[in-house]
Image: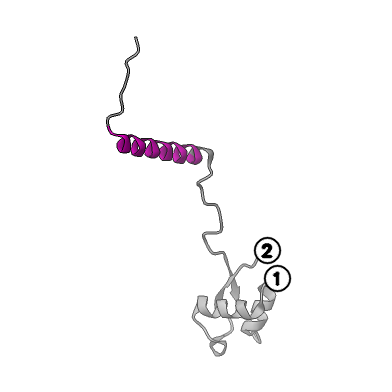
Amino acid sequence: MFRKYRIVSKPRFILFTALLCLILFMTITTMMGLNSASGDTYDQYRTVTVQSGDTLWSIAERSSDGSADIRRLVYEIQELNDVKAADLVDGMQLKVPVTTD
């Protein structure tokens, strides 16, 4: 009724068993959603229009939620828009990172 199987190559059997367990583990964790990466993988920005008398510092202060370092936010605005403080002109559109905690 039952056939008796014999292991011919022990290293090959161990390798097969290990790979089978690995594939089974990966399949189960994927089906359960444990392998999915959920995080902020994209940057969020808000567009701000420069008004008369605005500086990068004042724009960063208005856009901050209070938890971010203003100096860091000013630097990010400069890098994101490729501008310096002297380049600001009334009506200019700037992308400002959204800071949330």
Q: Which residue occupies 32% across, 18% down?
A: 4
Magenta-span inclusion, residue 59: no
Colour scheme shown:
one colour
Callout 2: helix, strand or loop?
Answer: loop
Instruction: Reply above or below: 22 against 89.
Output: above
Query: How many other residues sit within 10 Å of disc 1, few (<14), some (14-19) or many (≥20)?
Result: few
Residue 28 in magenta stretch: yes
Disc number at residue 67? 1
Sequence-wise, which precedes: disc 2 or disc 1?
1
Give the magenta-colored segment's residue range: 9-30
Task: Using the rendered image of the protein, determine whether residue 92 is visible from the camera's viewpoint.
Answer: no
Q: Secondary structure at mark 1?
A: loop
Most common secondary structure along the magenta stretch:
helix
Q: Is residue 49 something that shows in the picture?
A: yes
Q: Amino acid at mark 1?
A: Ser
Q: Residue 58 sits in which quadrant?
A: bottom right
Residue furthest toward the right? 66
* Residue that carries the numbered disc 2 in the rendered image: 101
Label 2–label 1 contact, CB within 8 A: yes
Q: Position of residue 44 (x, y in %)?
A: 56, 64
Q: How many marks?
A: 2
Give the camera-side residue of 86 and 100.
100
Q: Compared with residue 19, is residue 97 higher up or lower down, i.e. above or below?
A: below
Expressed as whole percent of the image width and height from the top left, the position of residue 45 reads: 57, 67
Depth check, front residue: 60 or 32 = 32
Residue at 66% across, 76% down:
69
Picture coordinates of residue 15, whole percent (x, y):
34, 39
Q: Quadrant of residue 26?
A: top left
Expressed as whole percent of the image width and height from the top left, the position of residue 48 reads 60, 73
Going by the numbered disc 2, the residue's amino acid type is: Asp
